[in-house]
Structures are given as C-alpha cells and as structure tokens.
Amino acid sequence: MSTQFSQLSDHIFVHHDAINVGILRDGNRALLIDCGDGSVCSTLDALGITAVDTVLFTHHHRDQASGIGIVASADTRIGVPAQERRWFESVETFWNDPQMRWHLYNYHPHNLMLAESVPVTAAYAEGDAIQWGNAKIRVVDTPGHTDGSVSYTVEVNGRCFAFCGDLIYDAGQIWELYSLQKEDETTDYHGFLGDRGRLTHSLKKLQQRFPEILIPSHGKIMRDPNGAIDALLSRLDVCYDKYVAISALRYYFPKLFTEFEGSAGHMPIREGKEVPEFLRHYGTTWLIISENREAFVMDCGSPGILKQIQRLKTEGEISDVTEFWITHYHDDHVNAIPEFQDSFPCTTRADSVVADIVENPRGFRLPCISPAVARVDHRTQDGDSWTWNEFKMTAYHFPGQTYYHGGLLVEGRGVRLFFAGDSFTMSGIDDYCSGNRNLLGEGVGYDRCLAWMAELSPTHIFNCHVPCAFTFMDEEICQMRTNLAERERLYADLFPWDHPNYGMDEQWVRPYPYEQDVAAGETVTLRVCFTNHSSAARIASCRPILPESWEVDIPERSATIPPKQEGHIVLSIPIPTHINGAQRTVIPLNVTYDGRPLGQFREAIFVFSSNV
C-alpha cells in the first residue's frame, strides 16, 4: 500500500489509514499519538524514522491501539489516559465479566475494546505536561466519545496543534452517534445523545487552548477549529431537539425534558384509554382472556408473572394458557420464558427476526440481551394470521423500539387491539437507545411501524410498560413520520457517510454467531453480515485477526452487498490442534467497506471447553 501522510510542520506529520496517527519527529526517533493498526510504519520508513520512543493514546478503543505490537519495541514508552488505564493493561477483565456480556444497560465501556492487554508505562490526566524534543505536550481531559478520553495539545515553534481523538470528525460532523449513549438520571440505555453535554464541554475546552489545527482520529484535519466545533455543537442541538419532539421517554421521565416544554414542533402527550375488561397487565406482560377462559400470554420477564398466572388459574379466572407471543428479545420480556414454557407447554409464536435471537442469544451482542433461551414453535412473517378462540391474530415485523421486534393485531369483540411491545407511548416513539437499531428512512424502522398504524387503524395500542391503552390521530402519525424524514436529512449532515444509518446503526456490521463454542482441530464457520444502507451496491471486505500463537493467517475475503439489503461474507477458520490461550478468545475482524479501511471494526468470541 502506498504511503499516505500529511506534513503539518517541520516536526509534525499525520499518517492516514483507518485512523489518523500523529507523528512528532525528532531526528530519527518519533513520538506517536495513537498508533492505529500499525500501518504507520510505512510512513515512519518514508520519514527516515528508525525508533518509536513514545506512544500516547487518546482513548482505549481497538482502532486506536491494535497495532501497538507492531510499532512498539521493548524500549517504547506507552502513555494512556489515567481513567482508562485498566482498559489497556487488564482488558481481559472486560471480556471475562458476564456483566459486560449480558443484561447490557450501560454503554461505557461497550465498543471496540482491545482484544489483548498492552503494557502501560505512564497514565496522564488533565494538567500533565510532557516535554519531548522541542515540543511541549499538554494533556486535556476531554470525555465524550469515551468516559476517559483525553486530547493532546502540541506546542512547537510557536504553533499549537490539538490531537482530539474522536471528539469530532470534521466541521459539524462526528464519526458515529452510538458512543454518545449516556444517562445520569437512569441508565445509559435511556440516554440517546446523552453525552452531548460532556462532548460540548470538552470541545469548548479545546477552543480555549487556541489550537491552530485540529487533528481527529477519524476525519479531516481542521484548520478552522472554532468554526468546525461551533458547527458541530449547533447541529447536535438541532438533532437532539428533533429526537425530543416525539420521544416516548417524555411519558416515562417528564422531568428530564422540562426545558423543552412548549417547544415548537413537539407533539403533545396523548391521554390514555380504558383497557378492555378481558385484558390483564402484569409487569411487562399483557394477557388476553377468551370467552372460554383460555389465556393468551405475551412476554414473561420475571418469575412473578408465573405466580400471577397461577393465581388466575387457582381463582378460576382462566382455565389454562394455550398460546404465547414474544414481542421482542429484551431481558425484561424474556428472562423467565424457559420457566414459563416448562410450566405452560403451549404454542409459542414470534416474529422470525425475534426468534433468531431468543433461540440463540449467544449469537448476538445487543442492549438488554438475556442469556435465557426460548423455544419458538411458529416463526411469523408480515401478515401471517391465525385464529385463537374468538380472536383473529395477525403478526407483523415491527422494527420500532428495536429492529428485533414483532407487533400483533388482535381483532375481536368489536375492537382492534395492537400490541406494539415497547415501541410507543402516548408521547411518541421509544427510540432512546441507539443500540436498538432504530433505522431512518422511508419504509424502515419507525417509519414502517407508523405506516402500519395508519393502515391498520387500531382502536387501542398497547405498550408492555404502560398500564393503559392509547391511540394516535392521523395528524400525529403524519407529524411523527415527517419528523423522521427530517431527521434522515439532518443526521445525513452529521455523519461522513452517504446515509445516516451508518453513523446510527452500530450493528450494520455484525458477526454471526457473535459467540460460539469451538474445539481444537475443528474448522469454525463465521458469517460477517453487512447491512448496506446506501442506494448503490457496496464492496465489503473482511479478515479475522487470529492470535499470533495460532500461526494461522486467513486471507481477506470480499463480497458485493446489494443496495438497501443485508449481505454477508463467510469465513472458515481452522482451530489449531494445540492452543495456548484463554478459555474465551476475542477474534477481531478487520473490515474495509466501499474502499474505506475501518480497522478492527468488530469482533467475535470463541469459547474453548478447556485450556490446552
């Protein structure tokens, strides 16, 4: 590959690949700011640099640091942000902690962790200064992209340069949105764009250092830092306002949004409706009682639901449970399904996309995911209908609160009931967790769900967390769809992609299965799935990065992904007969998409039955 770098001064260079790597040169030695995948060595050679004296990291992500074993020697000093030291030198604690795998409600840390620990020489925080050659480097705490991110200002020959990690991509742009998922009042799960406050504070701190040039990890070198930052902060405010305008969270936590009361374009909160007398609501479970006293149950998140159902049987209100429907995969809806299915061996139905997860949760890494495994007897597709006693049931793929979600229309007794899982409240849509894959665009995500509401015209809509029913007027459905179309345009400006879903959908590249059992001597199949959000076909390439001790190198494989569809690359990975490694082994996946190198963008987990 040809060397690609920029020269900013006599002493400062930037290597461009999956990320930008800062290079400070002093004769034949260098100090690096981040190191990327190690391809910076080509630029070091071109500059006549023979020794890497120091590497300073802005944050702990794998795309910043995966090449440290290539660029560093035994004498290289490695400096990291003080708040993130453990994610460099003891990252195995993350990968081996079940709390970092299941029931994921907090996002920091959550993405792009190193596959293996690296040694740390020093940890730096706000106010620390490093003299290196004729450059003075100052450390600035700049959380936002991660909790412990730092930036480095480099003063040399009367000029100031700021290396800011992933705080900003370009004027008015960020690399992606999901790392800003953060919440202080509840959990990160409810904090869509919640870290924009810390991001704003961090960017303004950098402005106060008056850098001449701003160098991000992902993105373009900015020669008007103030203009670039101001444009981003203004754009984030507009994007967040569009989110709040129709957010379901206003119903759950109204105090979080008091500053937006009376804002123009914000949808009023609807009044609730009385629930039909043949329904019961416990926790996140809705239950329908037929005229013959049979019960149709939706979701089972806790053992307490089983006790409620047993009580209904004991008191004669129901005779038995004869059907079960799973709305979506979140743990508060599925944790107790195995016990439920043992107690009530009835027919279980779920949308086919939901069934993929609940039947094999180890295959996915998603918010609120549970290790509980459910049995699905019937996988439904859009429009599949069946009769249950006096009711007609019709199933839909309903990618609302999460992409992995089903909706159920129940018609009978003079009403049309739509069970929307967790997808709506009286104040709007439940898109407060970016990890749920709330896609933007006509006919996808919530736009698809709202189109169904307009077409089906239910008399009652039900949310699993809301004890009453509600509906939306036609003008409210129109307002929400218009808002989503406006967001598609606004967020397209926020990200450096040809469609905003690349910046919003963390799962647009995902391995399947995410986690699987492997044994020495076998060949493992791993499918890497790509969702092409673009309007034209895209070429995707991928190769696994295997432990050096395996002495196995898998060549890169490529595939053409059709527009607006999901495609995949199948990797066959031979497992050595003798393995020297941990029981859980992280397999990073190096990805290139549409000619853009993304580095070790995702990972899969191999679990060995025992150490060899």
Image (spheres, helix red, strand yellow):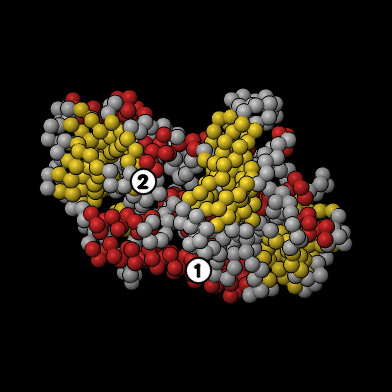
Q: Secondary structure at mark 1?
A: helix
Label ID, residue 493? 1
**Alpha carbons under labels 2 and 1: distance apart:** 29 Å
Instruction: Please state the horizontal and vertical placement of residue 163, each as a whole percent of the image.
Output: 68, 63
Q: Quadrant of residue 550?
A: top right
Direction from residue 525 to residue 267 in the image, left or right: left
Q: Earlier in the sequence, mark 2 or mark 1?
A: 2
Picture residue at 72% right of the left edge, 70% below the top: 160
Few, some or many C-alpha atoms within 10 Å of disc 2 (few <14, some 14-19, many ≥20)? many
Instruction: Please state the horizontal and vertical placement of residue 413, each as a whole percent of the image.
Output: 12, 44
Picture residue at 21% right of the left edge, 44% below the top: 410
Instruction: Please state the horizontal and vertical placement of residue 193, each as a whole percent of the image.
Output: 47, 59
Picture residue at 21% right of the left edge, 53% below the top: 458
Direction from residue 202 to residue 505 in the image, left or right: left
Instruction: Please state the horizontal and vertical placement of residue 97, each as a whole percent of the image.
Output: 55, 36
Picture residue at 25% right of the left edge, 33% below the top: 323
Q: The C terminus is located in which quarter?
A: top right
Q: Is residue 123 visible?
A: no
Q: How many marks?
A: 2
Which amino acid type is marked by label 2? His
